[in-house]
Image (tube, rainbow, N blue to C red):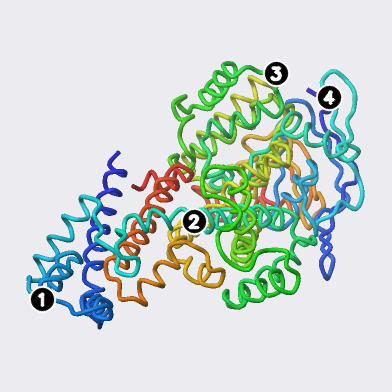
Amino acid sequence: MRYLSRKLGFYLVALWAALTLNFLIPRMMPGDPVEIMLAKLGQKGPVTPESREAIEAMLGTDSSRPLWAQYGDYLAGLANGDLGVSLVFFPAPVSSIIAQTLPWTIGLIGLATIISFLTGVGLGTLAGWKRGSWMDNLIPVTTMFQSVPYFWLALILLFLLGSVWPVFPLNGGYDVYNVTPGWNGPFLASVVYYGTLPALTIILSSIGGWMLGMRNMMVSTLSDDYMVTAEAKGLRSRRIMMRYAARNAVLPSISGFAISLGFVVAGSIITEAVFSYPGIGSALLQAVGGNDYALMQGILLIITLSVLGANLLVDLLYSVIDPRIRARG
Amino acid sequence: MSEPVLTIENLSVDYLVDPVVHAVRDVSLTLRRGEVLGLAGESGCGKSTLAYAIVRLLKPPAMITSGRAVFHARGGGDIDWGDLGPEDLRAARWDKISMVFQGAMNSLNPVISIRDQFEDIFTTHRPAMSRRDRRLRCGDLLESVGVDRGRLTSYPHELSGGMRQRVMIAMAMALEPQIMIMDEPTTALDVVVQREILRELTRLRDEHGFAVVFITHDLPLLLEISDRIAVMRDGAIAELGDAYQLYTQPRHDYTKQLLASFPSLTGDRGSFLRESA
């Protein structure tokens, strides 16, 4: 219990630090969102000083108020789930933009990361267990995919499988013309169809690391004394492989998995840019382009929360699967 | 006592490296039911390789080049360990011959509880056993080696070295095997704990009547606990004989040399040997 509360305390402090940085960084960037908004309005007609004040109040960037007061407003707003109004997608509130885009990102990148981890670790287990078999030759191939720049791999696959042999659609999250979003079969089928190629690129580019790491840990675990004991005990080889070898060898991979889970939201930017996927990465890209403080802050907040959340989850998981950690905590 | 439980005939093991290492050369041994057979010799003389060869635990590049180990079941019927298929071999391990290993500290899986490592044995070899019986038996086994039953829920890192070795011995007795091979079981322990464990072992042997192959480089220790002793050198058995006889009238030069190399508590170096060689 003490272990748990200490962990939670640590994560609370980290959360506070992240929130504060999240508040400060956009305000240090060049460019004033109010000016941009005014310029947009100015194209349609003259702008009165009152509307300037109104915009400042709405965007929460009232430059006449001191920074600490803005900080207070910001924290109060967060507590109420109010992340402000987006500039790029005006007048939609930031929270609704995030609510729209986040499921796409989590669905695509999250699932792809999990699939990549599970297959990579699974293949690595087998490759390590049967060291020197044909499985070992798979590793250089997968690491090659990992070493080429991701956007390049994605573009090549998109070109080959979307344009040369049009097996998969070129862009988008679903077929916007023929299906209606919602929990219906055609829509979900369309989402899966459109998501396959982006997911494939993510899996291809990340599976090598999982496989190589797991294979090497398996090989070093196999030479441990307790493996001989397990064999002398007359256990079935499947049980030895899963319960004694893989169980122990997977521990480092799990902490790696935590880190990559945390980057699910952040790492989506390139994927979503290449495939024009309607996820949170595309939204962040537009927010940066349009000096949209509120949206940027909102998305960075989500990224921070997901990194912290994933790490907390794995910290707790780790203490369950490795008793040695528990004892020290 | 004279009925054999294990016969090793002309067993040879080579390590197929360059140049080839003949680790065990033409070893023939008979282990009698319920006896403690000591296997002594210096490091690298092939003691452990011989032990692993008996239960076919050798990994490449080690290879058994000739000979066989035949197990004589209690009710009659011989089992040539080398003729068993993979599944039969697996089933025979631990059930007929169990082992306690050299690396006592690392022989237990660090991330599984003691209970799970115990129950592994029963779920694999005695699938018909009920959960309740399994739990009870695990506790009984632990208590028989002087470890509290409550330790079942512990993990290996929470136990001392001596306790871990006791746990290993308890595990080795789980299926009531007729032979227990102990490969330097007390080498990593201090002399006090070593003494306790050996006393425990002798008592258990008297109760359950299993035969022990006790491998160590510690000849004085063997003299104390063994019925017979085989002295190995360069993969071959230099001398095999009754423990007392070997102590009082060593025939082979190497045995004399070994005995002479242990100091006595009170005398000069070499005075451990009673009849000066």
Residue A176 vertical position relative to residue A287 in the rendered view, above or below: above
Q: Nearer the viewer, mark 1 or mark 4?
A: 1
Q: SS at mark 4? A: loop
Q: Which mark is residue B73?
A: 4
Share a chain, discs 1 and 2? yes
Q: Is residue B145 left or right of residue A90?
A: right
Q: Disc 1 is attached to a residue of which chain?
A: A
Q: Are marks 4 and 3 in contact (CB under 8 Å)?
A: no
Identify the residue shown where x is 43% and y is 50%. Answer: A314
Q: Amino acid at mark 4?
A: Ala
Residue occupying image coordinates x 17% and y 66%:
A60
Q: Residue at x 84, y 28 (%)?
A: B4
Viewer-proximal residue among A158 and B106: A158
Q: Is residue A173 above or below residue A312?
A: below
Do the residues at discs 3 and 2 belong to one chain? no
> In terms of sequence position, does the residue under pointer 1 or pointer 2 come before the other?
1
Q: Is residue B102 visible?
A: no
| Chain letter of the residue beneath label 2 in the structure image | A
The mark lying in front, picked from 4 and 3, is 3
Disc 4 and disc 2: Cα gap in Å?
66 Å
The numbered mark at residue B128 is 3
Q: How many marks?
A: 4
For marks 3 and 2, give the CA distance. 50 Å
- Identify the residue position indicated by label 2 in the image: A104
| Residue A19 located left or right of residue B2 | left
Label 1 with label 4: CB-CB less than 8 Å: no
B69 in relation to A143, above or below: above
Question: Mark 3 and mark 1: span between their CA atoms?
Answer: 87 Å
Q: Nearer the viewer, mark 3 or mark 1?
A: 1
